[in-house]
């Protein structure tokens, strides 16, 4: 993941889905098991949605097919 960021300035789609899954899990567990006041639940869920939107729409995505094509063309040099 770090290598993808350094080489392509992006994150693979599978890693993004994993990150979104982790955010949803942590936010859900916090809201369900900690039982915060209603205003805190709204804040937690809102911040979680902002985080998910950032992961999906702001952080660039590196597609596996693009990586395979660049490897085939010799553009990507593995360290």
Image (tube, rainbow, N blue to C red):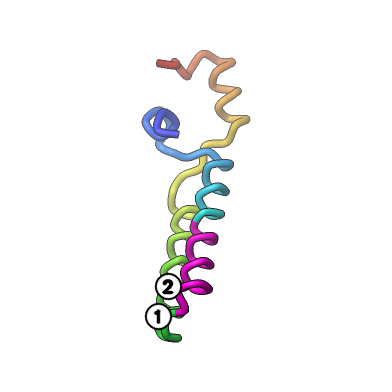
Quarter of the image containing the C terminus?
top left
Residue 4 or residue 18, whichever sits in front: 18
- The answer to whether 52 is drawn above or below residue 34 in the figure is above
Q: Main secondary structure of the magenta part?
A: helix
- Secondary element type, mark 2: helix
Residue furthest out toward the front: 33
Q: Residue visible at 40% across and 80% down?
A: 40
Q: Which residues are magenta?
A: 23-35
Residue furthest out toward the left: 6
Mark 2 lies on residue = 44
Direction from residue 13 to residue 58 in the image, left or right? left
* Image spot of residue 25 (x, y percent): 54, 60
- The answer to whether 48 is drawn above or below residue 75 in the figure is below
- Measured in 3D between alpha carbons, the distance from the residue under mark 2 to the one under mark 1, in whole angstroms, is 6 Å
Residue furthest out toward the bottom: 38
* Image spot of residue 74 (x, y percent): 51, 13
- Secondary element type, mark 1: helix
Asked whether the residues under the numbered discs 2 and 1 touch, taking CB atoms below 8 Å apart as contact, a structural biologist would say: yes
Residue furthest out toward the right: 65
Label 2 crowding class (10 Å Cα cut-off): few <14, some 14-19, many 20+? some
* Image spot of residue 75 (x, y percent): 48, 18
Mark 1 lies on residue = 40
Label 1 crowding class (10 Å Cα cut-off): few <14, some 14-19, many 20+? few
Q: Residue visible at 46% across and 69% down?
A: 30
Quarter of the image containing the N terminus?
top left
Rendered image: mark on residue 32: none
């Amino acid at each position: 993941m770090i290598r993808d960021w350094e080489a392509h300035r992006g994150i693979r789609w599978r890693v993004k889905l994993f990150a979104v899954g982790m955010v949803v899990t942590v936010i859900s567990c916090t809201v369900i098991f900690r039982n915060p006041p209603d205003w805190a639940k709204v804040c937690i869920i809102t911040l979680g949605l902002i985080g998910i939107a950032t992961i999906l729409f702001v952080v660039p995505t590196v597609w596996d097919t693009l990586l395979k094509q660049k490897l085939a063309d010799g553009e990507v040099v593995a360290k």
